[in-house]
Image (cartoon, grey):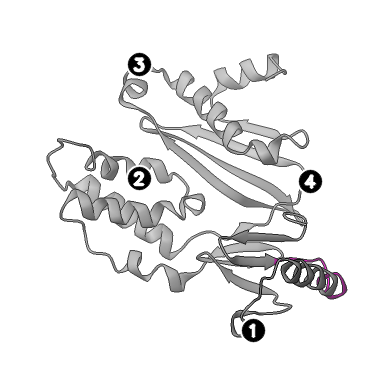
Amino acid sequence: MKYKYVMNFVDDLVIYSKNIEEHMIHLRNVVQRLSEHGLTVNPAKVKFACKEIQFLGHLISKDEIKIDQDRTKAITDCEPPKNAKEVSRFIGAVSYFSKFIPGYAKYAACLNDLRKKNTKFVWTEECQANFEKLKECITNPPVLAIPNYNEKFILYCDASEKAAGSCLMQNIEGEKKPVAYFSKKFSETERRNLTVYQKEALSVVWSINKFRSYLEIKKFTLVTDNNALAWVLSHFRKL
């Protein structure tokens, strides 16, 4: 039953179905299972047959997932942090929605540096610019597509000096749509010692591991703009 048509977060349940007839069967099965274990639900908190639901800060429908803007006011109204604790509070709130933010780790890098132990707090122009960029990304986030596991995935990977990033996409009704974004900051050692080629390669490895549950089902297309890495991957098909 779990993950076939029902999922939970603590004591919140979401039941999802392809059509209303199937939905009624699923509802009956879940209610019966709850009853068998002596559990009840609060009728005032139950919504039936919804085309879109609010769940954990997201708006979810059969085709897409969006950020629930009612849950982001604290982020968009946030003033520039004045100390490391306030930076941590801001980053903690924004990182929850990082899968909606292309290049999140790159923009968060200098802010995360301010959270390090024994680091003097200096709010630079770069910090301010990236702070505003992250707020902008939360205010105008992309809409993510609900993945179709019968279709091929496309994984775009890239790397900058400070971070690796990727976008998992699918062709849906003739249009490429994002399913999720991923990014990860390079460590100081990685920044200093890795070549551009190596950073691009690490971006591929990290991204495949991140999206393994999507990609291991069937063949996928990997896209990178690094010519040397593209040549290597084209000649070594067993990853």
Which residue is located at x 37 percent, y 22 percent? 190
Residue 80: in magenta span: no
Q: Residue furthest bottom?
A: 44
Q: Mark 3 to mark 4: distance in Å? A: 38 Å
Marks 3/4 in contact by CB < 8 Å: the verdict is: no
On the image, numbered disc 3 is attached to which residue? 193
Q: Indicate the amino acid at tag 1.
A: Pro
What's the magenta region?
Answer: 15-23
Task: Specify the quadrant of the image occupied by residue 172.
Answer: bottom right
Q: Quadrant of residue 112?
A: top left
Label whose residue precedes the other's in the sequence (3 or 4): 4
Secondary structure, mark 4, is loop
For the N terminus, which image quadrant?
Answer: bottom right
Position of residue 92 relative to residue 26, above or below, is above
Label drawn at residue 43: 1
Sequence-wise first label, 1 or 2:
1
In this picture, residue 116 sits left or right of residue 3: left
Tell me the SS state at disc 3.
helix
Q: Position of residue 5 (x, y in %)?
A: 76, 60
Q: Which mark is residue 151?
A: 4
